[in-house]
Image: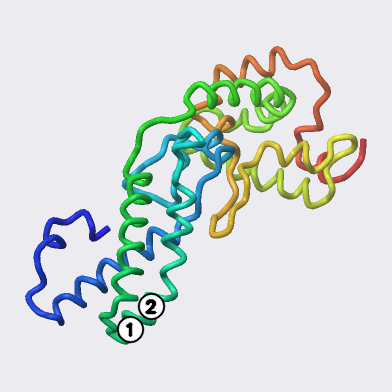
Amino acid sequence: MTMLYEDVTKAPADEQDFWRMVDENFVAAKQIFAFPLQTREEALQSEPYDAFLPSFIPYRGASSENDQRDYFYNLGNGQIDRLEVLISERQLTPEFAQAWGVLMCSYGHTLNYIMDDSRVLVAERGAASSAEKRNLIPQRVWLAHVMWPYAKGWGKRRRGEELTVDLIEKVIAKGGWGEFGPDWFGAMLSPKKAGDGERQLKSSFRQNKFSVREMEEAMAEGIEPIPPTEETSLLSGKR
């Protein structure tokens, strides 16, 4: 993020130095505008945002009349192809000056969204998490039974989560089990996005939010029907 360094405010020593600075800032701007925009729905489901490891332009919950995130994001992206040509050909023209000014303005505005690590949608995220927990009680009971052998110990639990995800994906691939279709099992997994590695359990089912004590409570209080918890029964398709 070259714009953050003070040396970019210094006057270039000569034209070659000027184009060096342009190249550096252009690369930085393209990196920012390559990030996708986070939606409100994704913000509600996400973990706390880390401004030092950005992978998207975060949603900030501004009012509709003041939220210019999408406008400047699209405005900046709209200059990149034109500037690729002008910069590669070293065309220091009025067209370059206009396009460059628009890009840098849009870049600075968009960069502010990335560097702002304030927490947003706190109440809404809490309500959404609580509603999801209520709606997924049968899945919590089923997971508690499946992961119980791995419940104690961080290393065992992580391995247990990996094996559970693998089991869920196998059941989904075979079309679910009885009345419990693929969507029932898929509700326990985080959404799959382009570029992601292996799928994971949703954050509400991982160790820091689904403790040993909560597993015990789920197994003790679970009264609704759930699928079998043994892999052989699940994959056999028999009732």
Residue under label 1, please give it.
88
In this image, 229 relative to 121: left or right? right
Q: Residue at x 47, y 25 (%)?
A: 122
The residue sitting at 35% across, 63% down in the picture is 103
Residue 99 in percent (x, y) is at 35, 69
Location of residue 181 in the rendering, given as x and y in whole percent from the top left corner: 84, 40
Task: From this view, report whether residue 155 is shown above or below residue 91.
Answer: above
Looking at numbered disc 1 in the image, what kind of residue is underneath it? Answer: Ser
State the residue position of label 2. 84
Q: CA distance from mark 1 to mark 2?
A: 6 Å
User: Element under label 2?
Assistant: helix
Q: Dot 2, crowdedness within 10 Å: few (<14), some or many (≥20)?
A: few
Residue 46 drawn above or below residue 94? above
In this rendered view, identify the residue nearer to me: 136 or 11: 11
Q: Is residue 144 left or right of residue 238?
A: left
Of 107 and 238, nearer the camera is 107
